[in-house]
Amino acid sequence: DLQYNQAITPGAKIMFAVWSEVNGQDDLIWYTADSNGHAIAKYTGTYGLYNIHTYQNLNGQMKGLNGRTIDVPKPSAKVSIVKASDTTYKVTVSDVPAYITSIQLPTWTEKGGQDDIQWYGTTYNSDGTFTKTFSVAEHNFESGKYNVHYYGISSVTNTLTGLGGTSFNCDYQFGDIAITAQMGATGIEITMPQEIAKVANVSHAVWSKVRGQDDLKWYSDTTGHVVAPYTGDYGTYHVHTYANVNGKMICIGATSLDIPKPSAKVSIVKESGTTYKVIVSDVPAYITSIQLPIWTEKGGQDDIQWYGTTYNSDGTFTKTFSVAEHNFESGKYNVHYYGISSVTNTLTGLGGTSFNCDYQFGDIAITAQMGATGIEIMMPQDIAKVANVSHAVWSEVKGQDDLKWYSDTTGHVVAPYTGDYGTYHVHTYANVNGKMICIGATSLDIPKPEVTVHIDKVTDYSAKITVTDVPIYIHDIQLPTWTSKNNQDDIKWYHATKQADGSYVYTFYAKNHRFESGHYNVHVYGTSEVTHSFVCLSGSDGIDLIFDESLTNPTVTVQN
């Protein structure tokens, strides 16, 4: 790397004459620097002293500026080897000359000569070192003396050049490879170091202790993770791991594990007046789903339901069920729990329990409230969905002459008003095995409509009408407005605008009433969804708008 650091004469070029001391100037090369005085001179194939003479070329006239030498030493490096794991070693090559562009590591064991030699490439690091981590799996899992030489590609000679060599003792022994086997959802999960599985042609022999090796199977492993399906037995499973070394299978590890017979725990908590939550916990990994046959003691299993469950992130399986699915019966409930086992591929009983259900009439939250177009009836959706529910609705006026039935499958029904104000009754029934049983009753009052009217003066010629406390079943508020003068000859029916807070407002102007000064009368009407009629809701005190009519309604006289 050549750099001329002095000022360069305008119009001049800087040139460098470079040659090695070996064989005189037979390899001399001239290099022209760039405008900044910089050039790169190639190595010419020899180590040792290089001569560098610097010249100025100005209009073809060469002028020597300076001369110097630089030594390019023959290549060498240092190496260190550390144990990275029970089966891997890390080689670090340091103090590498800048002209060495890559490092290779021929590595082999003393045993058998160079029959296991591997030429490893290395990784260049920001600190100038070259590193490589290798596994004993790449050397037939042999222990003892390992030889490590290190070579580099030299930019000086453009050849692969030996830099040095060393050796170390590998203490690998059977059992050093971390091979684990654990119970999985669909089989035995076998894990081992990936770098070994990748190169050692690994196979796992897996069998259950029951009946010896009648169910032994081999599983190839190139990734460090294999799932060996269960073979139908609980108890002890053996896993022996082999590597194919030069056509010979050698055992590199052995382990075993126990697959216990399935069991689980269950808890039942009351969620609401009509629902219970079943929680199944401590479920073995090989149980992939849980089913819950549930029935009441009353009538045997006439109401049995097989419920599926939901798997949760904490490993539990849960299901919330309703008494509606069991004829609304109280008393003793039986809960058994079964699971699909990946070991035997069968539905397997895990246990059973019972609890007392204290459901009684009135526990179902059924509400009825005044709505815009009718009585809004609400109840738990889970009951409406399964219990074949119907609501009987009627007004107290004239008994049940207006009774109507409303089917409910969603937990929300609107029963239209029947024309009467006052008390409405709502009785809720479920069809249980063809028999209608009452599961709830409520009532509500639909009051006759009353409103509040406020009239505020805005200007001398206008006023704002605000109608509040409007029942939800009233809409289309209209405001007949007129002056006291000449009766209702100027009456106007104004449509009020509904506001976000439920009130209705309208601002009227004297100009729409012939600019008459005096008292203005305002009444309030609206459409009732109860009676399906347009009804008077309120009168009011009205408001006085007093002003000089001559200023607003002038008389025009034409004179000749």
Image: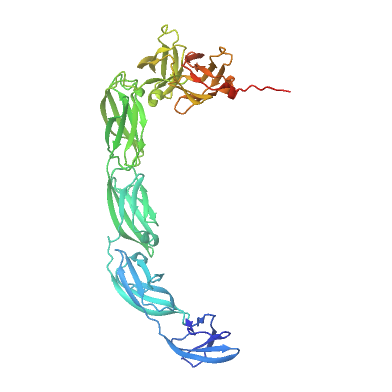
Q: Position of residue 15 (x, y in %)?
A: 54, 86
Residue 470 or residue 481, whichever sits in front: 481
Residue 72 or residue 350, whichever sits in front: 72
Q: Position of residue 98 (x, y in %)?
A: 42, 78
Residue 378 visible here: yes
On screen, residue 46 above or below 102: below
On screen, residue 194 above or below 14: above
Q: Quadrant of the C terminus?
A: top right
Q: Residue furthest bottom?
A: 24
Q: Residue furthest front?
A: 560
Q: In which quarter of the view is residue 149 placed?
A: bottom left
On screen, residue 101 above or below 518: below
Residue visible at 36% across and 36% down in the picture: 310
Q: Position of residue 366 (x, y in %)?
A: 36, 21
Q: Position of residue 77 (x, y in %)?
A: 36, 78
Q: How many marks?
A: 0
Q: Residue furthest top?
A: 398
Q: In which quarter of the view is residue 371 placed?
A: top left
Residue 110 visible here: no
Residue 202 or residue 88, whichever sits in front: 88
Q: Is residue 209 left or right of residue 186?
A: left
Query: In this figure, which colouring scheme has been used for the structure?
Result: rainbow
On screen, residue 319 above or below 154: above
